[in-house]
Image (tube, rainbow, N blue to C red):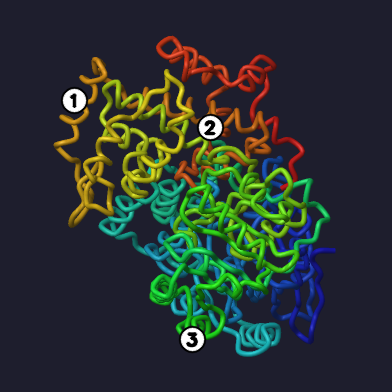
Amino acid sequence: MPVTYARQGRIGVITIDNPPVNALSQAVRAGLLQAADAFAADDQADAAVILCAGRTWVAGADISEFGKPPAEPFLPALIDRIEALDKPVVAALHGTALGGGLELALGAHARIAAPATRMGLPEVTLGLIPGAGGTQRLPRLIGTQAALEAITSARQIPAPEALEAGLIDRIAEGDLTQAALDLAHDVAGQPPRRTRDLPAPAVDPAQLQALTERLARSARGQIAQATAVDAVREGLALPFAQGMAVERAAFRALMDSPQRAALIHAFFAERAVAHLPEIQGVDPRPLDRVGVIGGGTMGAGIAVAALLAGLDVTLIERDPDGAQKATATVAGLLDGAVTRGKLPAARRDTILSGAFRTDTDYAALREADLIIEAVFEAMEVKEQVFAALDRVAKPGAVLATNTSYLDVNRIAEATGRPGDVIGLHFFSPAHVMRLLEVVVADRTAPDVTATAFALARRLKKIAVRAGVCDGFIGNRILSHYRAAVDAMVLDGASPYQVDRALTKFGFAMGPYAVSDLAGLDIGYMTRQRKAAERHPRDRVPVFADRLHEMGRLGRKSGRGYYLYGNGAPQEDPELAPLLDRVRADLGLTPRSFTDEEIVARTMAAMVNEAARTVADGTALRPLDVDVVMLNGYGFPRFRGGPMHWADAQGLPAILADIDRFSAEDDHFWQAAPLLRDLAAQGRSLADLNEGTKS
């Protein structure tokens, strides 16, 4: 039974035991209702405590019930029942109290928490708002503004802050259970302090307006945050029961919204990507000592990610000066983590004095379990590195390349142990970005793949398996939709209009702002590398080459597509004449594009190439594409990823766009056979995800 009721002296003890995170399944809700009734009928109990076994208090809803018809007892009614009890109930929190778990605690009459407990209402991350009283009870405890900040940000509140705000009544000193029993003894015999009966706090119109304006920027295009603000504001102006009705109506409306479906898809997809048949039951290799080759921005970021995960790291540079610079870079990144409160200063000092070192001799990597190469993106250089690693690495060491585009099979053949070689494509900054493309070569051993996924878990990253091709999943798709937007600019669109249209759609940044951030030399070198493979009908972004030739490399040079100085990037008035000259040289007559057409062409190109990556096995499933684009390329999360978005639009509509664009350019615009097949069968891309374990 997931919930039990017992008594210790005059205190009833309700225990939830539903591992691993004590989720509020139907069985738990039913058990809590029975336990509440048992406590109410127990004349020998003057107060009760609700405890959770295991490592955490109730950490939220049962995700296995997502998408299924709701089953009684419903959580709002259960919490109402507990709150209405005539004898006080104490919630004893530890671990995380999130979502419905925190709402359950809000319905108790007193709350005590272990010192490391964290509390929050993260429903907006799933396109929802709290639906069991969170928008009405939390403001009554901590005030309107603090409650709105917590709900709209999904931030987890640490116990000391919760105590100061009034969210909890005590922090336990010593054993939580005993402290909760002591609190129950203290409140026994007193009238229950019901949160719903506390006066509704005032709503400051100026603060509310400021928050609304901030959310319009930070949560651009999302509806849950604004809905939460409205539910709190409208609900608090009414009696509690009517305020709850406002909350429930808003919650149900969001349940039926496309954004909720997209965000739930993203949630499950990020859990499904790690479930691969090829590594089921396969044990990873040992993973304690890591080597990194190259101390530039990427190599230093990888080293810091490993150090923060508790790994021992040796970084190799070409010469003492390079090693000294790499040490300074790593130390600076760790200092930044200390400044942001992510790392205690004492731990930084321990890392720099013991877990991290630099060297100039590959021999220093003889005991490394995993070696990650992060040198210049040139095949000849990487082949030399791997030939050298083959000579010094111990048997069984995993040899990984951080290449963004290059052939991992060819890199593996530079060694006598291709089974030990794998691609680990980190995203910059590597110590921050969550995505890790795990590029499995033809001869990569299964336990090497398992080790890569184990590394990702340890680094708290989301790993996605990719096959070998130019650009793997993300950069391959990026190159295709970037070709589509470059073609629009050649034909008359402004790069600034393109950026505005796509950020309005929900992208974190437009493609030309991204180019400036990465550096225009990156794209230039990629085009040079692939020039020999270029088809005569491929459209070359001549304007991008011109900018590079002028030394306009983006942010690092102070000028690219935009001008950079103090404050926000500015549009460059010299760009339009440059584009006019390029178009004239190419004999192109410019035309105008609507924002809607810019989005349609960009998305059609993205979905089309993504379908090809699934069809040829570069990506195992459509959901793998979605996770890559969401976590590495700024795709709007509230749209679920390009494959989920395509299903929502309907594949016939996507194909109609591609066919329409093909009338102008039947070289670039050729529909992926997979899209045509699925549309003809009346199926969706999501059908290819079926059977995926989540």
Graded by Cα atoms within 10 Å as few (under 14), some (14 to 19) or many (20 or more), the crowding at tag 2 reads: some
Graded by Cα atoms within 10 Å as few (under 14), some (14 to 19) or many (20 or more), the crowding at tag 3 reads: few
In the image, 678 versus 648, the foreground residue is 678
> Most extreme residue toward the top, as rendered?
663
Q: Amino acid at mark 3?
A: Ala
Q: Which residue is mark 3?
A: 346
Q: Earlier in the sequence, mark 3 or mark 1?
A: 3
Residue 415 screen position, x and y as percent: 67, 54
Q: What residue is rendered at 40% in x and 47% in y? A: 226
The disc label shown at residue 581, or none: 1
Q: Quadrant of residue 13?
A: bottom right
Q: Quadrant of residue 402?
A: bottom right
Element under label 1? Answer: helix
Q: Earlier in the sequence, mark 2 or mark 3?
A: 3
In the image, 595 versus 39, the foreground residue is 595
Element under label 3? Answer: helix
The disc label shown at residue 500, or none: none
The answer for how far apart the CA atoms under marks 1 and 2 are is 37 Å
Residue 110 visible? The answer is no
Relative vertical location of residue 481 with respect to residue 209 in this rendering, above or below: above
Q: Is residue 145 left or right of residue 132?
A: left
In the image, 74 versus 343, the foreground residue is 343
